């Protein structure tokens, strides 16, 4: 399927225009200030998710007892 965009359009603009410039991305990444709703450090993300999983499993265990 061909990709189409409309030059000058705000609704149908080229996908690349939605992305941060490479330089800006590098600045934000290096400052650990990426504007995303998830943890960008893989190890920290996994530790947090594992802790949440353990907490939920403990809750299930308590409810099953």
Image (spheres, rainbow, N blue to C red):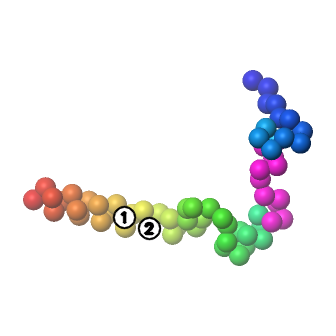
Relative vertical location of residue 17 with respect to residue 35 in this rendering, above or below:
above
What range of the chain is rendered magenta? 14-24
The structure residue drawn at horizontal position 80% and vertical position 66%, both measured from the top left corner, is: 24
> Local crowd at mark 2 within 10 Å, few (<14), some, or many (≥20)?
few
Dominant secondary-structure state across the stretch colored magenta: helix
Give me the residue at 55% from left, 62% from top.
38
Residue 8 x, y percent position in the rendering: 89, 42
Residue 42 visible in rendering: no
Residue 52 badge: 1
Q: Secondary structure at mark 1?
A: helix
User: In this view of the protein, can residue 30 be seen by the observer?
Assistant: yes
Label placed on residue 60:
none
The crowding category of the residue bearing disc 1, from other C-alpha atoms within 10 Å (few below 14, some 14 to 19, many at least 20), is few
Residue 26 relative to residue 7: left or right: left
Which residue, given by chain and number where applicable, does mark 2 sit on?
A: 48
Kindly identify the residue that appears in the image at 37 percent across and 67 percent down: 51
Q: Residue at x 62, y 62 (%)?
A: 36
CA distance separating discs 1 and 2: 6 Å
Q: From the viewer's perspective, is residue 20 above or below residue 1?
A: below
In the image, residue 10 lies at what x, y percent? 80, 44
């Amino acid at each position: 399927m061909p990709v189409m965009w409309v030059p000058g359009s705000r609704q149908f603009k080229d996908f690349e225009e939605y992305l941060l410039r490479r330089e800006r991305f590098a600045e934000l990444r290096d400052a650990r200030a990426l504007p995303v709703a998830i943890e960008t450090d893989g190890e920290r993300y996994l530790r947090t998710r594992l802790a949440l999983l353990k907490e939920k499993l403990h809750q299930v265990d308590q409810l099953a007892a």
